[in-house]
Image (cartoon, rainbow, N blue to C red):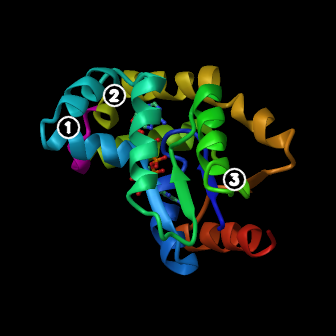
Amino acid sequence: MTNLVLFGPPGAGKGTQAEILKKKFNLVHISTGDVFRYNIKNETELGTLAKSFMDKGQLVPDEVTIKMLNAEVEKNVGAKGFIFDGFPRTTAQAQALDELLASKNTEVAAMIALEVEDKILILRLLERGKTSGRKDDADEAVITNRIAVYYKETAILKDYYEKQDKYYGVDGEGDVKDITVRLATVIEGL
Ligand code: B4P
């Protein structure tokens, strides 16, 4: 199994690239953000809870997110591997992912991080906010908070995977196609 963690701040292009890479490498793409948004749209209990955090640019509590991620993995038992997009975002989530994959006799092969300057992230998200209907993209203060939460709570995971020799940084600026080539080069070299 090839299990990849696609990493980077909000707007780094994780979702954009995961959509392309899943087809190229025949992997199952799990985006925790997408699963939360699906639940919000369908007005489930999980959606109502997640919305209260997401609208402010905060992380949804670990307990809720981990439970949901486990359920998504269980839905795809025959998968050749996974692209985890937006998960893990905290050390507790990273440990939970390790435990889950170990129980399936597999592990994270690599964390691939898209590196993008904050200025560009804000421009990309404001641009998406014009059409996406996403409340967390429409307000620059919420975007800035999401980026701050990333540096405070999520960026630390670089160390977690670096210690295991699994961290790969990739330039996430420029043309979408060029970035895919950079990511594919890392994946093919694993
Ligand atoms: P996510 O859904 O993960 O949202 P994101 O970080 O904004 O998305 P992403 O980084 O994938 O966006 P993309 O670059 O593709 O999270 C949203 C919220 O959900 C979080 O704030 C949190 O509240 C909650 N959440 C999710 N997972 C969680 C977890 N594990 N724990 C706790 N809470 C969690 O796209 C950005 C834009 O840039 C797009 O418009 C795209 O078209 C554009 N773009 C992409 N690449 C580009 C390029 N090369 N050039 C120009 N534009 C580009």
Q: Residue at x 32, y 46 (%)?
A: 35
Label 2 or label 1, whichever lies nearer to me, is 1
Q: Which residue is drawn at 81% across and 73% down?
A: 189
135 sits left or right of 108 in the view: left
Mark 2–mark 1 contact, CB under 8 Å? yes
Label 1 crowd (10 A; few <14 / some 14-19 / many >=20): some
Q: Assign the magenta stretch its main secondary structure.
A: helix
- Mark 2: which secondary structure? helix
Q: Is disc 2's CB within 8 Å of ligand 1?
A: yes
Q: Which amino acid does label 2 sit on?
A: Met
User: Quarter-wise, where is residue 129 in the image?
Assistant: top left
Give residue 40's mark.
1
Ligand 1 shows up in which quadrant of the image?
A: top left
Magenta-drawn segment: 131-135
Look at the image and say whether residue 158 sits in the magenta stretch. Answer: no
Q: What residue type is labelled 1?
A: Ile
Mark 2 and mark 1 lie on one chain; the one further toward the N terminus is 1
62 or 169, which is in the foreground? 62
Disc 3 target residue: 108
Label 3 crowd (10 A; few <14 / some 14-19 / many >=20): many
86 or 123, which is in the foreground? 86
Q: What residue type is labelled 3?
A: Val
User: Quarter-wise, where is residue 117 in the image?
Assistant: top right
Give residue 54's mark.
2
51 or 177, which is in the foreground? 51
- Mark 3: which secondary structure? loop
Q: Is disc 1's CB within 8 Å of ligand 1?
A: no
Compute the Cα span from label 2 to label 1. Answer: 10 Å
Question: Residue 77, image x and y in percent?
Answer: 46, 64
Mark 3 and mark 2 lie on one chain; the one further toward the N terminus is 2
Where is the N terminus found, in terms of image quarters?
bottom right
